[in-house]
């Protein structure tokens, strides 16, 4: 009896397993700018898969597959090591920028926090240098384990960012219940001219201020977007208006202007 052929998702999952040790996964970095000083204050690490046959793959091609096949934690460890090593090097050179890492809600377990804090310590990254970005999604259950993990990270000096606020899942109640140090306004609201969008962001900013948290505008691409981020009262912004995600080797000139 012939074996059934693998479906495309299973095939890609197998290739992703091999990519963990083959050096195909790398971090690109998109700068976050302080809106008052126009200086780079942080970098968001974004995974790129340099597939030997398919070329450069963006996360939307493989993140869901990693979730479905139980590979998301391994992917997170690779990204922390790769981007953390780069960030530690920049700090040694006197370029003191923060590092943001995307984390799946399914990773939020106490052992994850312990492993992350150990890695940050081993790489000699300073306290406060790393922030985890969490997308509010149906996977985020607000369980005791998740809340304990977030508190452990915060106690260890790791920031917690609620990513993609307003993208369809995030509610204001989530912001009222979860501990966080930053909230990122989803790019979809940047081009939403309805009064309800401005009202939603205004409430978000108010809650963030109550938490003494930073507000970041995502998807800033035009002068109009930049003006809107200022009008909303955002502290930071990122997007093509400033810079796209870039390989580490192409960031030297940008980081020379870091705060």
Image (cartoon, helix red, strand yellow):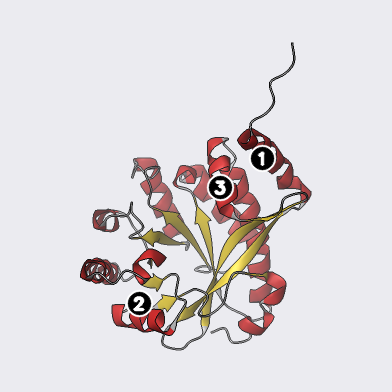
Above or below for 234 versus 55: below
Residue bearing mark 2: 234
Task: Pick whichever of labels 1 and 2 is earlier in the sequence.
Answer: 1
Disc 3 residue crowd, few under 14, some 14–19, many 20+, Cα 10 Å:
some
- The percent coordinates of residue 10 (x first, y second) are 63, 33
Task: Pick whichever of labels 3 and 2 is earlier in the sequence.
Answer: 3
- The percent coordinates of residue 181 (x first, y second) are 38, 65
Which residue ends up furthest to the top in the rendered image? Answer: 1
Q: Which residue is drawn at 56% across and 77% down?
A: 243
Is 213 or 119 nearer to us in this picture? Answer: 213
Task: Pick whichever of labels 3 and 1 is earlier in the sequence.
Answer: 1
Above or below for 118 versus 194: above
User: CA–CA distance between discs 1 and 2?
Assistant: 39 Å
Query: In which quadrant is the N terminus drawn?
Result: top right
Disc 1 residue crowd, few under 14, some 14–19, many 20+, Cα 10 Å:
some
Residue bearing mark 1: 12
Please indicate whether residue 93 sits to the left or right of residue 161 in the image. right
Please indicate whether residue 160 sits to the left or right of residue 11 in the image. left
Q: Which of marks 3 and 2 is in front?
A: 3
**The disc label shown at residue 63, or none:** 3
**The disc label shown at residue 183, or none:** none
SS at mark 2 in the image: loop
Asked if residue 233 shows in the view, the reply is: yes
Is 35 or 224 nearer to us in this picture? Answer: 224
User: CA–CA distance between discs 3 and 2?
Assistant: 29 Å
Dots 1 and 2: beta carbons under 8 Å? no
- The percent coordinates of residue 210 (x first, y second) are 25, 69
User: CA–CA distance between discs 3 and 1?
Assistant: 11 Å
Above or below for 241 versus 136: below
Q: Tell me which corner region of the image, top left, top right, bottom left or bottom right, holds residue 15.
A: top right
Q: Residue at x 29, y 54 (%)?
A: 174
Q: Which residue is drawn at 30% across and 82% down?
A: 231
């Amino acid at each position: 009896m012939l074996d059934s052929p693998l479906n495309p998702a299973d095939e890609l999952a197998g290739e992703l397993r091999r990519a963990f040790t083959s050096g195909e996964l790398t971090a690109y970095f998109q700068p976050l700018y302080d809106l008052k000083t126009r200086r780079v204050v942080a970098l968001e690490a974004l995974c790129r898969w340099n597939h030997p046959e398919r070329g450069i793959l963006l996360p939307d091609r493989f993140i869901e597959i990693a979730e479905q096949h139980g590979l998301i934690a391994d992917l997170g460890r690779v990204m922390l090591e790769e981007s953390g090593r780069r960030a530690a090097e920049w700090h040694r050179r006197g370029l003191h920028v923060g590092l943001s890492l995307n984390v799946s809600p399914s990773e939020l377990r106490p052992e994850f926090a312990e492993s992350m804090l150990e890695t940050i310590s081993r790489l000699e990254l300073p306290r406060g240098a790393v922030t985890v970005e969490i997308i509010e999604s149906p996977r985020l259950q607000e369980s005791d384990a998740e809340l304990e993990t977030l508190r452990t990270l915060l106690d260890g000096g790791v920031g917690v960012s609620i990513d993609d606020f307003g993208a369809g899942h995030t509610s204001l109640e989530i912001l009222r219940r979860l501990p966080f140090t930053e909230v990122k306004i989803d790019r979809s609201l940047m081009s939403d001219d309805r009064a309800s969008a401005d009202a939603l962001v205004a409430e978000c900013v108010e809650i963030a201020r109550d938490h003494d948290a930073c507000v970041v505008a995502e998807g800033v691409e035009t002068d109009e977007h930049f003006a809107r981020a200022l009008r909303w009262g955002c502290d930071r912004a990122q997007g093509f208006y400033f810079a796209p995600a870039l390989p580490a080797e192409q960031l030297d000139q940008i980081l020379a202007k870091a705060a």
